[in-house]
Amino acid sequence: MSPLKKDVTNEADVTGLLLAWSDGEESARDQLITAVYEELKRTASRHLRSERDDHSLAPTALVHETYVKLVDQHRVHWQNRAHFFAIAARVMRRVLVDHARTRAAAKRGKGVTIPLDSDHDVAVPVNADVLALDVALDTLAAMDERQSRIVELRYFAGLTVEETAATLDISPITVKRDWAHARAWLFRELQR
């Protein structure tokens, strides 16, 4: 097995590859993408699971568009696996929103929906228009940036409470409290 094809699955290896990539090692970037591809694909699949059957953006395409945008992140000084997935979540959100805007402009109709479901600790499943969710998250960020970041990390990146806490340098109990408040606020906001 070549060094580029090395199986890299644990957090220390991913963090090491991120640091090497930050230092300019292009081969580390390639190894990293190989290491995190399946996790990114699972995240993309989760986001697209409740989309219409004829949705034109497949999980693989979403991962590839996210990857293209991630490799352009030359000025990011990667800290660890959680930091990478936080950035990937933000990029994936932008790709989904851009895709929904393009589709809405083409159809001049309804937006694409994504679920805020039980996989993310939401008590009642709610389908939220991805454009409405984007606006709501921007509004939430203006009121409480940390709660907005927690939603991005938990929902879009699929990070655990502990990973989210480490990424934001706050306690897990604070993440749980803010996550509950943010979900409740988003539920109310998106029901309007």
Image (cartoon, helix red, strand yellow):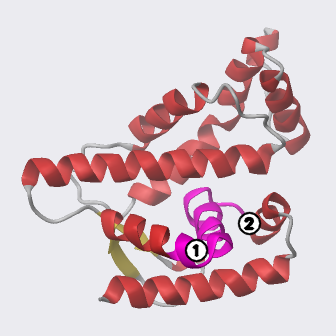
Relative placement, left or right, of 4 versus 52 is right
Note whether residue 122 is visible. no
Q: Is residue 96 above or below residue 2?
A: below
Q: Residue at x 10, y 62 (%)?
A: 109
- Reply yes or no: does residue 135 show up in magenta: no
> Magenta stretch: dominant SS?
helix
Pinpoint residue 80: horizontal percent, then vertical percent.
83, 43
Where residue 85 is drawn, which disc sits there? Answer: none
Q: Residue at x 33, y 70 (%)?
A: 132
Q: Amino acid at mark 1?
A: His
Report helix, strand or loop for mark 2: loop
- The magenta segment: 140-159
Q: Which residue is mark 2?
A: 160
Q: Which residue is mark 1?
A: 120
Alpha-carbon neighbours of circle 2 within 10 Å: few (<14), some, or many (≥20)?
some
Q: Residue at x 75, y 77 (%)?
A: 175
Report helix, strand or loop for mark 1: helix
Q: Residue at x 85, y 29 (%)?
A: 19
Relative placement, left or right, of 136 versus 149 is left
Q: From the image, which quarter does the C terminus lie in?
A: bottom left
